[in-house]
Image (tube, rainbow, N blue to C red):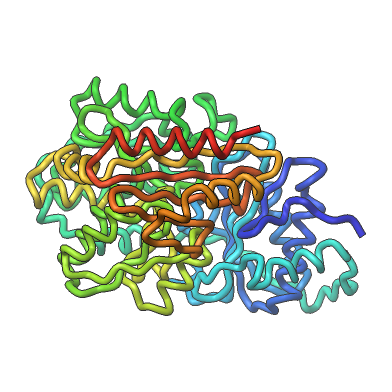
Amino acid sequence: MKTLNCFKAYDIRGRLGDELNEDIAYRIGRAYGEFSKPKTVVIGGDVRLTSESLKLAVANGLRDAGTNVLDIGLSGTEEIYFATFHLGVDGGIEVTASHNPMDYNGMKLVREGAKPISGDTGLRDIQRLVEENNFAPVDASLRGSYQQISIIDTYVDHLMSYINPANFKPLKLVINSGNGAAGHVIDEIERRFKTLAVPVEFIKVHHEPDGAFPHGIPNPLLPECRQDTADAVKAHGADMGIAFDGDFDRCFLFDETGGFIEGYYIVGLLAEAFLQKQPGAKIIHDPRLSWNSIDVVSAAGGVPVMSKTGHAFIKERMRAEDAIYGGEMSAHHYFRDFAYCDSGMIPWLLVAELLCVKGKSLQQLVGDRMKAYPASGEINSKLADPQTAIVRVLAAYQPEALCFDETDGISLEFADWRFNLRSSNTEPVVRLNVESRANTALMVHKTAEILALLRQQ
């Protein structure tokens, strides 16, 4: 029995050909059907050149397992989340490789209510069935049906419910879909804005979906993928820039100067926006960078709650706490009214509304927070022996630490600075985040100090 490397901690991702192909995709659909025994599953796919064929192979596997399939066509991951909970079906599968290289594809799986299927909630069981490949003969009389549907209207209705169009003043927005799957949603939101006479001008960059990605893989977390958005903001004198990854479950924001805003500071901004609408609510944040989020949430009368990093953990904690919003510094934002799922569309709509309500620029809204809690951003190190390196750092800093936490990796706090060090769940790297209290020089110094110790040969 061959072990399949495409099964990861949270989802399925693999190199096309040997790690993921139509045969494996068929078996994934078949295994999902046998494991969950769903009556109906909704499927969709991103713009990758192989997504359509892999999606249809998954559909065939599901149907041979007796499951009815609803295909929403070209879609982002959150459209599958929405369709699953809105239609009340038993599960959903999005075929996407998000920001992985060109020769990759993958899948994200959810059960009823758009709850994630990850390593400890069924993905390993599905993997075992796929690897065994020992399925019963197909009974044609029990084969599931296949139907193509559209959910764009009800999905955009839901997106629009997060904002009040009457709050909007004239705004100019640059929106970079990165030739990914976001374009059709942006077009529909623009159409709604025009119908409601919302005075927002959309400047679209790399808008057309194109699985060949002529302008590179859309991953604005990488500095080299930000230039086109920044240039367009400056060229058009826009109020804000918005860039998406391939399946648009993350959005990245740029201020009016074209400056990239770290996702960490957007968490505080969105937390404040929700707490204005629902004072006293709980807000979930991750441990990598936390002081700004805790400060903003506490000042706005909310309750900050820390959760382990990763969408499965955040969603689970949000459900347990009935939190209204959860945010990760990696630009994943989660919403209670969106079945606790992450969305890349809701955040920019809320921030655009906030610009109008507060009458401030994005730089003004986040500038003070960036000065109050300067942060290193996430720095990755590929290490031969990650565990020994982490222990070495811990031995050097723990004796002086005021607070030590192991919610996710190790977090150590001191009077004026803190850091988090963790091994990645998805890549062979160790990730470092450092922040300080209003002292950029200290943050820079401590970051260099820890990296030198970490990378010591």
Against 138, residue 106 (above or below) is above
Depth check: give the residue in front, 413 or 280.
413
The spot of residue 126 in percent (x, y) is 74, 68
- Could you tell whether 212 is left or right of 14 in the image? left
The C terminus, quarter of image: top right
| Extreme residue toward the left, this view | 359
Q: Position of residue 77 (x, y in %)?
A: 51, 55
Q: Residue furthest right?
A: 1
Q: From the image, which quarter does the N terminus lie in? A: bottom right
**Residue 161 appears in which quarter of the rendering?**
bottom left
Q: Residue at x 26, y 51 (%)?
A: 349
Residue 241 seen anywhere in this rendered image of the structure: no
Residue at image position (54%, 37%) is: 453
> Residue 210, image x and y in percent?
53, 33
307 shown above or below 190? below
Q: In the image shown, does 373 or 286 lie closer to the viewer? A: 373
Exactly how many numbered labels are in the figure?
0
On the picture, is 201 further left or further right than 377?
left
Residue 132 visible in the picture? yes
Q: Nearer the viewer, residue 223 or 227?
A: 223
> Would residue 121 appear left or right of 62 to someone viewing this image?
left
Give coordinates of residue 30: x percent, y percent.
77, 67
Residue positioned 81% across, 67% down in the render: 128
